Amino acid sequence: MSLPHAILTALLERPSSGLELTRRFDKSIGYFWSATHQQIYRELGKLEAEGQIRTLPAEQPARGQKKSYEVLPAGRAELARWTAASQDPKPPRDVMLLRLRAAAVVGTAGIESDLRRHLELHRRQLAEYREIEERDFPPGRDGPQERLQHLVLQAGIDLETFWTRWLERAVEEFAERPDTAGP
């Protein structure tokens, strides 16, 4: 149920066309709530049918023109209801952790190189988050909305820092093992 709420959030921040919305997702919300372009467009149709968003009137009618959307009062009310509702945390599901557990019983062939690959990916993501932080949250930019947005980014930074450190330890563990191929 969270994708419609992610879309409502993005549209409340700035009315957008479907294409603009998918691009914004790729650069912000998509870091912690991913969705394909098809999912976003499908959800826009549902939200419009439910009366939570509407297509903005076009300035000049043109064939094939992008439709831009804005949130209606019903959409804002739904987002406020969802934001205020209690929700329990979900247990983590990470395929690398499961694969490493399986490697303990069937052998570790191939997993060390993938651990190194994951480490590099997490290092890159951490660097990207830090660049965003430097660019978008300079000292003195601390209004209430910016502070909450920065808090979300800091969660991403903390998670990538965790994964980077954990993967460094995992790679070190493989370097210390006398036999990395057997169980």
Image (tube, grey):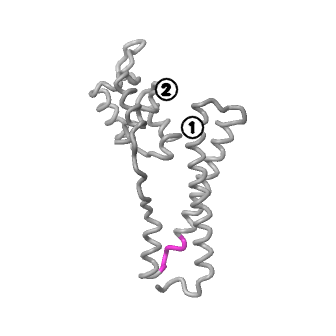
The residue that label 2 is drawn on is 14
Q: Nearer the viewer, residue 181 or 75?
A: 75
Quarter of the image where the N terminus is located? top left
Label 2 residue SS = loop
Of the numbered discs 1 and 2, the one sitting upstream in the chain is: 2
Task: Say above or below: 91 vs 181.
Answer: above
Residue 39: image quadrant is: top left
Residue 111 on the magenta span: yes
> Left or right: 33 with respect to 43?
right
The answer, for residue 36, to whether it is visible in the render is: yes
- Residue under the image location 44 percent in, 28 percent down: 11
The residue that label 1 is drawn on is 149
Q: Which residues are magenta?
A: 108-113
- Residue under the image location 44 percent in, 46 percent down: 34
- Residue under the image location 37 percent in, 21 percent down: 73
Could you say where residue 171 lies in the image, as x and y percent from the top left? 60, 72
Residue 106: image quadrant is: bottom left
